[in-house]
Image (cartoon, rainbow, N blue to C red):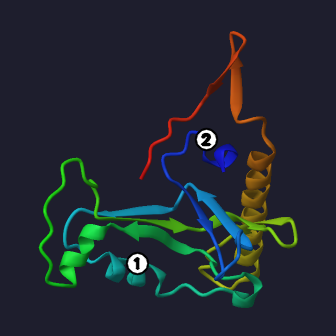
């Protein structure tokens, strides 16, 4: 994950797990979302997401397990006050955003059972003409190649003056 998320302001890691599994079968890693939606109030993000995805259709929906692209994100606990009558006290230093969602159109899929990695890229086809299909297909191949190149890049730690320094700043959510 650190190889992919280096220097990225927005990245995610989703892990799948079944009832009593110690490790989930799949991990989904992504970065560089097409869109980032944030809410600090009563904005209806679900409606915005539905509108954005309304014309989208996967060519092979059975080809991907579980997550197949789209929006990834979270609602903070404080959002419950919009759905139920509950008295919440404002916490000092609480979340700045009550919800954050990324529109994901490219990600890596790790299958822990098969020990394989798949690069997934969603391409938008505006016209079903042969020239458009070829252009979009070529663009998809280039995006997959960029994902592969990024995955193969060097170690996530840099040596400086004989010590190992981390390039990342970690913060708990």
Badge number at residue 15: none
The residue mark sitting in front, 2 or 1, is 2
Q: Earlier in the sequence, mark 2 or mark 1?
A: 2
Residue name at image x 35 percent, y 80 percent: 46
The image shows residue 62 at horizontal and vertical percentages of 73, 90
Relative height, residue 31 to residue 64 (above, below)? above
Of all residues shown, which one is farthest toward the top?
A: 161
To which residue does mark 1 refer?
Answer: 49
| Left or right, residue 155 beside residue 6 | right
Figure label count:
2
Nearest the eye: 170 or 143 = 170
Nearest the eye: 79 or 67 = 79
To which residue does mark 2 refer?
Answer: 6
The image shows residue 2 at horizontal and vertical percentages of 65, 45
| Left or right, residue 81 beside residue 108 | left
The image shows residue 44 at horizontal and vertical percentages of 27, 78
Relative height, residue 92 to residue 124 (above, below)? above
Say which quarter of the image contains residue 156.
top right
The image shows residue 5 at horizontal and vertical percentages of 60, 47
- How busy is the neighbourhood of tag 1: few (under 14 within 10 Å), some, or many (20 plus)? some
């Amino acid at each position: 994950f650190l190889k992919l998320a280096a220097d990225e302001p927005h990245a995610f890691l989703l892990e799948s797990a079944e009832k009593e599994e110690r490790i989930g079968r799949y991990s989904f890693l992504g970065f560089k979302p097409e869109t980032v939606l944030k809410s600090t109030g009563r904005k209806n993000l679900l409606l915005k997401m539905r509108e954005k995805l309304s014309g989208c259709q996967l060519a092979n929906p059975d080809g991907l397990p579980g997550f197949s692209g789209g929006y990834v994100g979270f609602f903070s606990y404080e959002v419950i006050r919009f759905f139920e009558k509950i008295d919440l006290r404002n916490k000092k230093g609480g979340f700045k955003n009550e919800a954050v969602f990324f529109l994901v159109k490219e990600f890596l899929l790790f299958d822990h059972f098969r020990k394989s990695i798949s690069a997934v890229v969603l391409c938008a086809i505006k016209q079903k003409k042969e020239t458009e299909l070829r252009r979009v297909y070529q663009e998809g191949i280039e995006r997959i190649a960029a994902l592969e190149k990024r995955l193969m890049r060097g170690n996530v730690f840099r040596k400086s003056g004989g010590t190992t320094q981390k390039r990342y700043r970690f913060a708990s959510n």
